Image (spheres, helix red, strand yellow):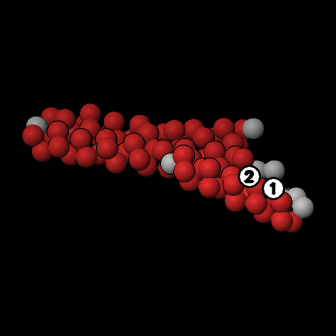
Amino acid sequence: MIEFVTAFVSTLALIAQQTGGVAVPPDTGAAIGVGLAALGAGVAEGGIGAAAVGAIAEDEEFFGIGLLFTVIPETLVILALVVIFIV
């Protein structure tokens, strides 16, 4: 993940050097923030979903808890979108 961010920043720096400056739209930081929040939520949901399916396979009473823990990371992305529209 950190390699992706460093490659992205170094690419922007290279473009800035070659063109004499980069005109960055004002909402670029917000877009990057929501994108990284969504990427992190997706990675978290992968592990949580696998554990939830394993728990539900062993005991069906864990369905509600497994569903709740699978949905929690996605609320972070929704919160990030709400914050962008408020700010």
51 displayed left or right of 14: left
> Where's residue 37, x and y in %?
55, 44
The residue at 41%/37% (across/down) is 72
Q: Which residue is mark 2?
A: 28
Q: Nearer the viewer, residue 3 or 66?
A: 3
53 displayed left or right of 21: left
Specify the label residue 25 is tagged with: 1
Specify the amino acid type for callout 1.
Pro
Specify the amino acid type for callout 2.
Thr
Specify the label residue 40 is tagged with: none
Any part of residue 35 in sight: no
Against 53, residue 12 (above or below) is below
Residue at the left extreme?
58
The residue at 62%/50% (across/down) is 6
| Marks 2 and 1 in Cβ contact (< 8 Å) | yes
Question: Circle 1: is it few (<14), some (14-19), or many (20+) Cα within 10 Å?
Answer: few
Q: CA distance from mark 2 to mark 1?
A: 6 Å
Which image quadrant is residue 63 in?
Answer: top left
1 displayed left or right of 68: right
Q: Mark 1 falls on what kind of element?
A: loop
How many marks can you see? 2
> Where's residue 66, x and y in %?
26, 38
18 displayed left or right of 50: right
Q: Mark 2 falls on what kind of element?
A: helix
The residue at 48%/39% (across/down) is 75
> Where's residue 11, x and y in %?
70, 59
